[in-house]
Image (cartoon, rainbow, N blue to C red):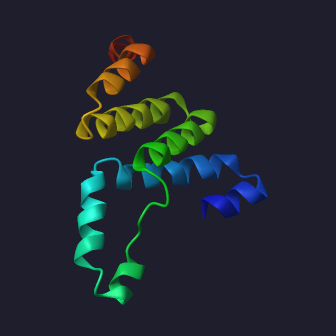
Amino acid sequence: MIKYFEQLGHHDKVARISLIKLEHIYYKNDLLYENTRKLLESKKAKLEDIYFMDRPSREVVQDLVQKISKECPKREKIRAILLQCYHHAIHNRVKEAKDLLMKGQFSQIIHKQ
């Protein structure tokens, strides 16, 4: 759907769909996908039914956050960046998560919200 709306030039819809997709994948560790693939190697039909990312999750999440940041209101941008921080944290990239939080000055923004 994202590619379809990008072709049509509906960037606001792309951003909303990106936020929905981000909410579905941000909390999943890469090990979950790897273990699922290993368990379902013998069951090809079930393996095809499950969504697997074609790139590393770090890149997918970063791409989705960029799409959201371009078009969505401030509240959704904040939400997307916080979801990205959580994704970094569960993958033991705490320094990157902390840098994102400090860069965005979320303590001041959240206080105003």
Q: Residue at x 28, y 48 (%)?
A: 27
| Front residue of this view, candidates 32 and 83 | 32
| Front residue of this view, candidates 81 and 43 | 43
Q: Residue at x 40, y 35 (%)?
A: 79
Quadrant of the image containing the C terminus = top left
Q: Is residue 79 visible?
A: yes
Q: Residue at x 62, y 52 (%)?
A: 13
Q: Residue at x 29, y 63 (%)?
A: 34
Relative image position of residue 83 (x, y in whole percent): 36, 38
Asked if 4 appears above or below 22 in the picture, the reply is: below
Relative image position of residue 20 (x, y in whole percent): 45, 53
Relative image position of residue 1 (x, y in whole percent): 60, 64
Asked whether, in this view, residue 81 is left or right of residue 11, the answer is: left
Q: Is residue 28 visible?
A: no
Residue 86: quarter of image: top left
Asked whether, in this view, residue 84 is left or right of residue 43, the answer is: right
Asked whether, in this view, residue 43 is left or right of residue 54, the answer is: left
How many numbered markers are drawn? 0
Asked if 1 appears above or below 99 in the picture, the reply is: below
| Front residue of this view, candidates 71 and 40 | 40
Relative image position of residue 46 (x, y in whole percent): 33, 84
Asked whether, in this view, residue 29 is left or right of residue 60, the answer is: left
Asked if 33 appears above or below 71 in the picture, the reply is: below
Name the outermost residue toward the right. 8
